[in-house]
Image: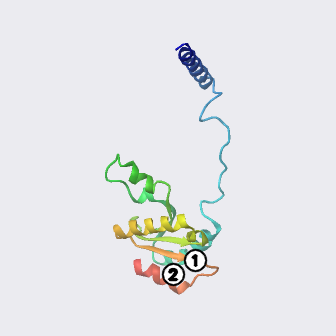
Amino acid sequence: MKNLYICAILLFILGIIVKLLNEKGVINENSNIKRYIIKNNPMTETEQKFLSYLKVFTDKNNLIIIPQVQLQSIFKTIEKKDISSFNKIKSKSIDFAIVDSNYNYKLFIELDDYTHNRKNRIQRDIFINNLFNTYNLKLKRIKVQNNYNLEELENIITEVA
C-alpha cells in the first residue's frame, strides 16, 4: 500500500513538472523542433510526367485536374461516429480527379506502378475499386509507362467530357 502512495505522489509531481515545462515552452507541440521536411512537389516524378500528357486533353475539354485527392474529400461516413468506416478511407488518396468547371467529378485516375503488385496494395486496390463502383464513380486505372498512348488518353477524356 505504501508503494502505491509513493507511485501516486511521484506521478503527481511528474505531472506538475510536465505542466511547468509546457508553460515555459520547453515541451511544446508547436516548438521549432523540426520533425518534417517540405516536399518539393506533392506528386511523384511518374505522376508529374503523366500529368503533362493528361493536361493537353483536359485543357482542350475545359476540365480541371486535381492531383492527390484524399478519399475523405470524396466520401464521408453516413454516421459521424462510424470511426471504423472512416479509418478505411482516411489515409488513402487517388492520384488524379478530373472535374468540370463546377467541380463535379467526371473521372478518377489511378496510376498503377510496380507497387500495385504487392499484397497490401492489391487489397487496397480492390477496396477502392469496390468503393468507386458502389457509388458509380468512374475510376480508370492506367499502368505506368515510359510513353503514354495519346489516342487512348484522349478517348478516356472525351468519354467523360
Residue at position x 65%, y 51% from top?
Answer: 38
Residue at position x 62%, y 65% from top?
Answer: 44
| Mark 1 residue type | Tyr
Q: How would you rate the neighbour count of disc 1 (Cα within 10 Å): few for under 14, some for 14-19, many for 20 or more?
A: some
Q: Residue furthest left?
A: 78
Which residue is label 2 attached to? Answer: 153
| Mark 2 residue type | Leu
- Say which element carries label 2: helix
Q: Residue furthest top?
A: 2
Question: In the picture, which quadrant includes the C terminus?
Answer: bottom left
Residue 108 or 150: which is nearer the viewer? 108
- Residue 61's spot in the image, x, y percent? 45, 77
Q: How would you rate the neighbour count of disc 2 (Cα within 10 Å): few for under 14, some for 14-19, many for 20 or more?
A: some
Q: Are marks 1 and 2 in contact (CB under 8 Å)?
A: yes
Q: Residue furthest front?
A: 1
Which residue is label 1 attached to? Answer: 53
- Residue 114's spot in the image, x, y percent? 61, 72
Residue 100 or 4: which is nearer the viewer? 4
Q: CA distance from mark 1 to mark 2?
A: 8 Å
Residue at position x 49%, y 78% from top?
Answer: 60
Instruction: Name the image quarter holding residue 23.
Output: top right
On residue 150, which mark appears? none
- Residue 55's spot in the image, x, y percent? 54, 74
- Residue 89's spot in the image, x, y percent? 44, 57
Residue at position x 54%, y 77% from top?
Answer: 56
Kindly tell me whether residue 161 is visible in this rendering: no
Q: Earlier in the sequence, mark 1 or mark 2?
A: 1
Kindly tell me whether residue 1 is visible in this rendering: yes
> In the rendered view, how is the structure colored?
rainbow
